């Protein structure tokens, strides 16, 4: 833990008071003078990020989760990383894992074995999870992929399939994967896109008949993510048009503008669901939405300055209401305009907070965001990362107890692996 100790020393020198990163009065703030960390601190942080990726995250997922017997990936591991036996396979985490290995190939850490791991998962998606009659990907299949256990076409799952196909097509130079991605986009466009109100129907039957006309922020945020990379791959004008629509949805339709935070569930016409169950904020989704919007806007040529006030308002809301100013890291969620009441630290929330804070610092050069980034990284190094059994603990409760699984229907190397890669590229100046 030498790196963790040296990192802690740096953090204390950067924020000796240990107090709140941003005051309530500064939540929507004045412009601050540019602030820059010293080069040694940046180098130390880069080493820490590389160590987490290469010594903590990657060894857990490669090659241990590759299912050599039944195809795809074995994603059913307990809190200590022990495999719990055969389990159904979800398109979300199968696709996310394909994406992760493909993204490694498309990074400075690319190696032939990671492309082979990505190809292994891609073949399972293509051969076992693609609906050969109606098209699109099943939500869930049995462990061998012989039977669809949930045959619905949920847009959340289709978004991750499109994301994975796009990244894999780039990594492998696979024209068939690119053609499949285009076929999937066309299906989504003709069967699930809401031409009257914008966005996508949340859930369709196997034959693409809409079941639910509910609109979810989380679904549209990941559609935004997928369309951003797909647009870069294809340069298709229809994809670009849909990406512009998704930018509007994620910067306006899901945002409670009088509060400065987003909410999850909306009616077909984007009127938000109301009531105590719905009037809540997921801090992880809000900060994730910020940096995904930044990348999407860059893709279509929208300058950062046009939405900078939105980014600061949403991030500062999360910092004010959902950040642990004593120990670092973001809490799970809370009611609108009140402090977090679900105060566990969930792995993916820390990953998204890390990227968003660094992205905010890159554009503003305000110390507040750098300090949030560094303190969140400190929390990850000292608490969220499992240095004994590998990868990150799913949840650290408010009482500091470890809970959850290492791999499952929702947990894969996507969030934390992506965070390390994105942050390293931001620090190297390869991401704007």
Image (cartoon, rainbow, N blue to C red):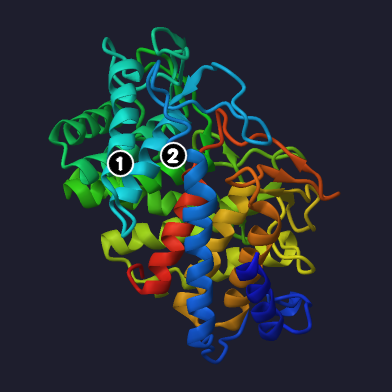
Residue 62 lies in what quarter of the image?
top left
Instruction: Evaluate whether residue 306 shows in this view.
Output: no
In the picture as drawn, the residue positioned furthest to the bottom comes out as: 33
Q: x and y percent of residue 339 in the render? A: 79, 58
Q: In this view, does 383 lie to the left or right of 140?
A: right
Residue ID for mark 1: 113
Position of the C terminus, as image quadrant, is bottom left
- Label count reads 2
Residue ID for mark 2: 62
306 relative to 384, above or below: below
Q: x and y percent of residue 341 in the render? A: 81, 50
Between 146 and 58, the one lying in front of the other is: 58
Q: x and y percent of residue 180 in the render? A: 21, 29
How far apart are labels 1 and 2 at the CA level?
A: 9 Å
Query: Which label sits on residue 383?
Result: none
Give the residue displayed 17% in from the left and 46% down from the top: 234
Give the residue displayed 69% in from the left and 60% down from the top: 382
Q: Which of the two labelled residues, at mark 1 and mark 2, occupies the earlier sequence position?
A: 2
Residue 183 lies in what quarter of the image?
top left
């Amino acid at each position: 833990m030498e790196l963790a100790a040296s990192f802690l020393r740096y953090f204390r020198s950067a924020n000796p008071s240990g107090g709140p990163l941003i005051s309530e009065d500064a939540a929507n703030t004045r412009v601050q003078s540019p602030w820059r960390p010293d080069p040694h601190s940046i180098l130390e942080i880069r080493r820490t990020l590389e160590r987490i990726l290469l010594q903590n995250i990657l060894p857990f997922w490669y090659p241990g989760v590759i299912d050599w017997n039944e195809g795809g990936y074995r994603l059913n591991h307990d809190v200590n990383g022990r495999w719990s036996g055969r389990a159904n396979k979800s398109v979300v985490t199968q696709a996310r894992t394909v994406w992760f290995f493909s993204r490694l190939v498309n990074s400075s850490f690319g190696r032939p074995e990671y492309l082979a791991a990505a190809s292994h998962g891609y073949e399972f998606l293509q051969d076992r999870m693609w609906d050969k009659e109606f098209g699109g990907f099943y939500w869930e299949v049995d462990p061998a992929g012989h039977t669809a256990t949930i045959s619905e076409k949920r847009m959340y799952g289709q978004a991750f399939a499109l994301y994975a196909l796009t990244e894999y097509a780039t990594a492998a130079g696979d024209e068939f994967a690119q053609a499949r991605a285009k076929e999937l986009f066309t299906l989504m466009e003709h069967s699930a896109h809401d031409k009257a109100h914008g966005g996508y129907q949340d859930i369709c039957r196997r034959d693409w008949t809409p079941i639910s006309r509910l609109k979810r922020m989380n679904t549209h945020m990941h559609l935004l993510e997928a369309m951003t990379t797909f647009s870069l791959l294809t340069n298709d004008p229809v994809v670009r048009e849909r990406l512009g629509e998704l930018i509007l949805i994620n910067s306006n339709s899901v945002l409670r503008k009088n509060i400065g935070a987003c909410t999850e569930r909306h009616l077909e016409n984007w009127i938000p669901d109301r009531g105590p169950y719905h009037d809540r904020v997921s801090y992880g989704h809000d900060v994730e939405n910020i940096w995904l919007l930044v990348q999407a806007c860059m893709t279509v040529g929208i300058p950062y300055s046009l939405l900078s006030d939105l980014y600061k308002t949403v991030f500062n809301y999360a910092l004010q209401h959902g950040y642990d100013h004593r120990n670092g890291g973001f809490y799970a969620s809370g009611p609108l305009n009140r402090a977090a009441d679900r105060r566990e630290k969930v792995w993916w929330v820390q990953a998204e907070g890390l990227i968003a804070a660094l992205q905010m610092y890159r554009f503003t050069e305000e110390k507040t965001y750098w300090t949030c980034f560094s303190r969140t990284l400190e929390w990850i190094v000292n608490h969220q990362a499992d240095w004994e059994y590998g990868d990150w603990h799913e949840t650290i409760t408010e009482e500091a107890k470890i809970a959850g699984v290492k791999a499952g229907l929702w947990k894969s190397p996507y969030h934390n692996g992506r965070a390390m890669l994105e942050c390293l590229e931001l620090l190297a100046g390869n991401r704007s």
